[in-house]
Image (cartoon, rainbow, N blue to C red):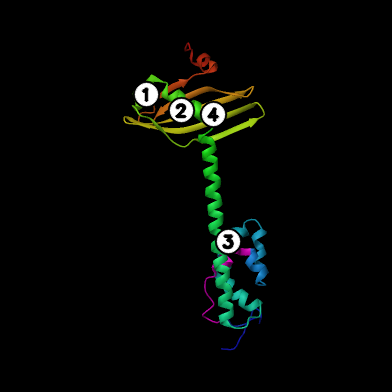
């Protein structure tokens, strides 16, 4: 077959290359610039960038063939396979980076003082122990911790499980003069929704009329 590459929009595209292009799908605008397919720069346009990876994956091979001169079909295929491999490598690295970030965040939360204070409050509460039984295992905390110098605030939730049932601990803690203190911690039974106060603050006592 005649080499029609680089012939523009009207050039015939060989059937053996007119197929899904993983390099174009994964590397989008980088692939586009290097393959003279500048429509890929629509990746920088809001909304359009949602569909462009799929458009490039479906039409990228044909566009790259028409927009650039290639030595042969085999040379084109070899180059696009390299793009696909690099795309997969970068995707894998990105996934590993995201997993690492999430793992670091969860590890930081689990080793944080507010979380440890909440765990200790749970293990020191007879009513909570009676509800869950022993031993009690606690899960990864969710929520956030904000600090600024010696002050800060934490709002966390984490699961708690024992031989008798499962529950969730919700806690609010504040940091003042460099020291953390739990203002309130509540154990919520997963089955009944019953809530047990592990640590109660003064404002809650005033609102409920319960003496500390």
For residue 113, which numbered disc appears in the image?
4
Image point 58% across, 61% down: which residue?
51
Where is residue 179 shown, x and y percent of the image?
60, 23
- Check disc 4: other Cα within 10 Å, few if <14, some if 14-19, many if 20+: some
Alpha carbon distance from label 1 to label 2: 12 Å
The number of numbered discs placed on residues in the rendered structure image is 4
Q: Earlier in the sequence, mark 4 or mark 1?
A: 4
Where is residue 124 shown, x and y percent of the image?
42, 21
| Helix, strand or loop at mark 2 | helix
Q: Which of marks 3 and 1 is nearer the N terminus?
A: 3
Q: Which of marks 4 and 3 is nearer the N terminus?
A: 3
Q: Earlier in the sequence, mark 4 or mark 2?
A: 4
* Position of residue 191 in the picture relative to residue 199 (left or right): left
Residue topped by disc 2:
119
- Span colored in magenta: 14-28
Q: Which of marks 1 and 2 is nearer the N terminus?
A: 2
- Residue furthest out toward the bottom: 1
């Amino acid at each position: 077959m005649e080499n029609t590459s680089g012939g523009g929009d009207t050039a015939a595209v060989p059937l053996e290359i007119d197929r899904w292009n993983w390099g174009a799908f994964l590397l989008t605008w980088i692939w586009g610039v290097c393959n003279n397919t500048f429509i890929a720069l629509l990746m920088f346009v809001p909304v359009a960038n949602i569909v462009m990876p799929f458009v490039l994956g479906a039409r990228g091979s044909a566009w790259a063939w028409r927009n650039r001169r290639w030595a042969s079909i085999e040379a084109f295929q070899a180059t696009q396979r390299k793009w696909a491999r690099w795309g997969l490598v970068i995707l894998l690295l990105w996934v590993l980076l995201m997993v690492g970030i999430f793992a670091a965040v969860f590890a930081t939360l689990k080793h944080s003082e507010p979380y440890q204070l909440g765990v200790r409050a749970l293990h020191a509460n007879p009513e909570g122990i009676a509800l869950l039984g022993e031993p009690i295992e606690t899960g990864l905390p969710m929520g956030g911790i904000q600090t600024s110098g010696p002050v800060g605030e934490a709002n966390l939730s984490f699961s708690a499980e024992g031989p008798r049932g499962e529950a969730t601990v919700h806690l609010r803690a504040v940091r003042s003069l460099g020291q953390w203190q739990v203002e309130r911690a509540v154990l919520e039974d997963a089955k009944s929704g019953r809530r047990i106060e592990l640590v109660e603050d003064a404002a809650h006592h005033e609102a409920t009329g319960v003496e500390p």
